[in-house]
Image (spheres, grey):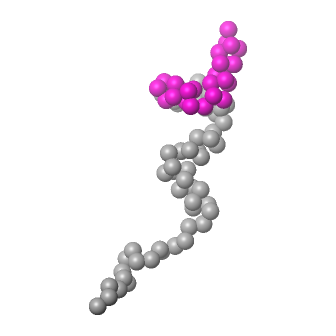
Amino acid sequence: MGVEMNGKGDKPRFYPDDQYRNNYDKIFNKGKKMSSEVTPEQYLEMWLSEQIPTGEWLRLLEWRPDINELYQKHLESKK
């Protein structure tokens, strides 16, 4: 007597296309793709408009040297 699987979950309901996979990656793979799509200028603008908490900003400065470089230039221009 074999086990037949004719119920829910026995086969995929759909086959994901490339757009689905890309969106899934952006959402569930810890933002790896999403964070690289945001430009340093966008991050700086969000920081200056107080949309990014200080702890997160400090982490971004360590994680993305391009953001840190732009921020340092911004600070120099303010002097």
Would you place residue 40 above or below residue 25 in this image?
A: above
Query: Residue sitting at 58 percent across and 40 percent down?
Result: 35
Does 74 appear in magenta? yes
Locate residue 53, reporting x and y percent. Answer: 48, 27
Can residue 16 be seen by looking at this rendering? yes
- 33 sits to left or right of 27: right
Does 73 appear in magenta? yes
Total labels drawn: 0
Would you place residue 79 above or below residue 29 in this image?
A: above
Q: Identify the residue at the far top of this view.
A: 79
Q: Quadrant of the N terminus?
A: bottom left
Q: Quadrant of the C terminus?
A: top right
Dominant secondary-structure state across the stretch colored magenta: helix
Locate residue 62, reporting x and y percent. Answer: 56, 27
Locate residue 76, reporting x and y percent. Answer: 68, 13
Which image quadrant is residue 39 in?
top right
Which image quadrant is residue 69 in?
top right
Q: Identify the residue at the far left of this view.
A: 1
Query: Residue sitting at 37 percent across and 77 percent down?
Result: 8
| Span shown in magenta | 54-79
Can residue 49 be seen by looking at this rendering? no
Query: Residue sitting at 60 percent across and 31 percent down?
Result: 64
Q: Identify the residue at the far bottom of this view.
A: 1
Query: Residue sitting at 45 percent across and 77 percent down?
Result: 11
Which image quadrant is residue 74 in?
top right
